[in-house]
Amino acid sequence: MVEDRVTDGKRVAQLLASELTGLETGPLDLVDVTDADPAAEPSPAGTVAYRVTAAGAPVGTVVMYPERAVVDLGDDELVVDSGAAVKQVVDAVRERLRGAVDG
């Protein structure tokens, strides 16, 4: 059996946005995707896909490359190189937000 692996940067960024805004538990219920540009296309230099906010405060920026997306959290960059990696990145963002909300 052959499994399709999603590695297109735009598609990965879209999957990430869906997960971040679709989960309504814990600190993720505060998350929004803002400044999204549906016409944006990945580029070798990186193209901003959207910004991530929590309760209106900036959390990070998602940048698309041809074969991945990167979540820039200011002091940290999380590489999302496939659709399967989206869950791990969402978990990392959740933990980051949990620390900010609890702290």
Image (spheres, rainbow, N blue to C red):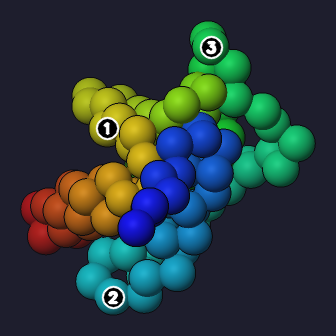
Place of residue 29 in the rendered image (x, y in percent of width and height, measured from the top left):
43, 81
Disc number lying in front (2 or 3): 3
Which of these two is toward me, 57 or 63? Answer: 63
Residue 83 % position (x, y): 45, 56
Residue in front for this viewpoint, 14 or 71: 14
Q: Quadrant of residue 9?
A: top right
In the picture, the disc for residue 44 is 3
First reached walking from the N terminus: tag 2 or tag 1: 2
Answer yes or no: do the residues labelled 2 and 1 have beta carbons within 8 Å? no
CA gap, disc 2 and disc 3? 35 Å
Which residue is painted at 52% across and 52% down in the image? Answer: 6
> What amino acid type is highlighted by mark number 3?
Pro
Q: Is residue 20 visible?
A: yes
**Which secondary structure, mark 3?**
loop
Alpha-carbon neighbours of circle 2 within 10 Å: few (<14), some, or many (≥20)? few
Q: Is residue 14 above or below residue 20?
A: above
Residue at mark 1: 78
Quadrant of image for the N terminus: bottom left
**Residue farthest along the top direction in this orientation:** 45
Q: How many residues crowd around disc 1 within 10 Å: few (fewer than 14), some, or many (20 or more)?
A: some
x and y, in percent, of residue 95 in the image: 18, 62
| Amino acid under disc 2 | Thr
Residue 89: image quadrant is bottom left
Can you say whether 85 is above or below 37 in the image?
Answer: below
Q: CA distance from mark 2 to mark 1?
A: 21 Å
Q: Please, what secondary structure does the residue beneath circle 1 have?
A: strand
Q: Residue at x 63, y 51 (%)?
A: 11
Q: Is residue 56 visible?
A: no
| Residue assigned mark 2 | 25
Q: Secondary structure at mark 2?
A: loop
Report the amino acid beneath label 1.
Leu
Q: Earlier in the sequence, mark 2 or mark 3?
A: 2
